[in-house]
Image (cartoon, rainbow, N blue to C red):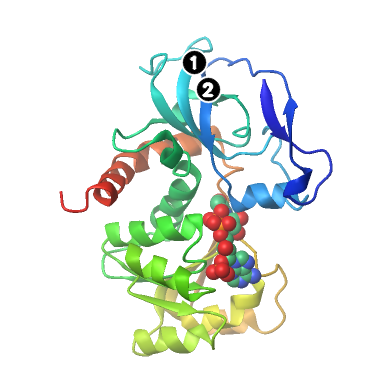
Amino acid sequence: MQAICFKEPGGPENLYLGRVPKPEPKDGEVLVKVYATAVNRADVLQRKGLYQVPPGASEILGLEAAGVVSGFGTGVKSNFKIGDKVMALLSGGGYAQYVAVPEQLLMPVPSHLSLYDAAAIPEAWLTAYQLLHLIAHVKEGESVLIHAGASGVGTAAIQLTRLFCAVPLVTAGNPDKLKVAEKLGAAAAFNYKEGDFSDKVLQFTQGRGVDVILDCIGGSFWEKNVRSLATDGRWVLYGVMGGKAVNGDLLGKLLFKRGHLLSSLLRSRSLQYKAKLVRASLSRLCHTLRQQAFPHH
Ligand SMILES: NC(=O)c1ccc[n+]([C@@H]2O[C@H](COP(=O)([O-])OP(=O)(O)OC[C@H]3O[C@@H](n4cnc5c(N)ncnc54)[C@H](OP(=O)(O)O)[C@@H]3O)[C@@H](O)[C@H]2O)c1
């Protein structure tokens, strides 16, 4: 089969259409003919040689895909049939004509979504769901500061924060992205390139700070993040796009706020964990995606 491959790490010009063996679905796996996949930041980092593929995962790029069921390994118990439209959370392998997926990580594509839209759902939306619900335990009425508000995970997190009846605030790097975030439900959106976003967060929350921070930036934002955090707040680190190192008295400042520093990675989680996440999130995600397609229903 064909797949998008690269030999040397680098820019997108290093990608080429190559030939690789078609996957054989193993016990409990479903073979999916891929119609569409998505570009996640982890794919970009992997292509640049900056992201280590977890042991056992496919070396082929692509953390999510949508397509149709085209075969089964032995022992598959679910009711999927040949030709069913599905989307899948992958630990790699989506940039290819076929991918073999554990049946627990397949989701039916809601009828109002095209396969092309569906391909961008599993990784970003399950990550956002996991961070908000399973890691931060966001509650009704709480405020959530979401960095990279126009990113894949960020746009999903804004909508899910609203679904959990909490209040999303975001940062992003240009006015168009701030508008996108506001359109999706952000109560306020701040350009982190224009001034200190923590001033604006404190102003918005009347000096209290936010209950939760979803942070994929890390190093470059740490000081403003601690300042933006409410006493007893939860700061969830899930990416380090702004650097891994911290210089300064982070621990002292965090302790003073009695802040909780949490972190999470989805790709390296066990199949059991991901399967539970897919099951738990499915009905709520479908509800939000339907609302998005038919906002007046
Ligand atoms: N832990 C997990 O399980 C998990 C799962 C999925 C994704 N992630 C992480 O989540 C992050 C977002 O992924 P994605 O695929 O949704 O991203 P994406 O759609 O590619 O968007 C990333 C955006 O982040 C902003 N950004 C990049 N570097 C920045 C910096 N130094 N300071 C501030 N903003 C910066 C940029 O927007 P602006 O123009 O607004 O700066 C950029 O467009 C990545 O770090 C990814 O690795 C983690």
Q: What element carries label 2?
A: strand
Q: Which residue is drawn at 41% across and 55% down?
A: 156
**Residue 274 vs residue 197, the one in the foreground:** 197
In the rendered image, is residue 216 in sight?
A: no
Q: How far from the left and from the top, in percent, is residue 274?
A: 49, 38
Q: Which residue is drawn at 45% across and 34% down?
A: 275
Residue 209 relative to residue 63: left or right: left
**Residue 233 vs residue 192, the one in the foreground:** 192
Q: How many marks?
A: 2
Mark 1 or mark 2, earlier in chain: 2
Work out whether 82 lies above or below 200.
Answer: above
Other-residue count near label 1 (Cα within 10 Å), few / some / many at <14 / 14–19 / ≥20: some
The residue pinned by badge 2 equals: 33
Dot 2 amino acid type = Lys
Q: Residue at x 48, y 56 (%)?
A: 153
Label pair 1/2, CB-CB below 8 angstroms = yes
How far is mark 1 from mark 2, CA to CA?
Answer: 6 Å
Locate residue 285: give its quadrant.
top left
Residue 54 relative to residue 210: left or right: right
The residue pinned by badge 1 equals: 70
Q: Which residue lies furthest to the top in this view?
A: 74
In the rendered image, is residue 166 in sight?
A: yes
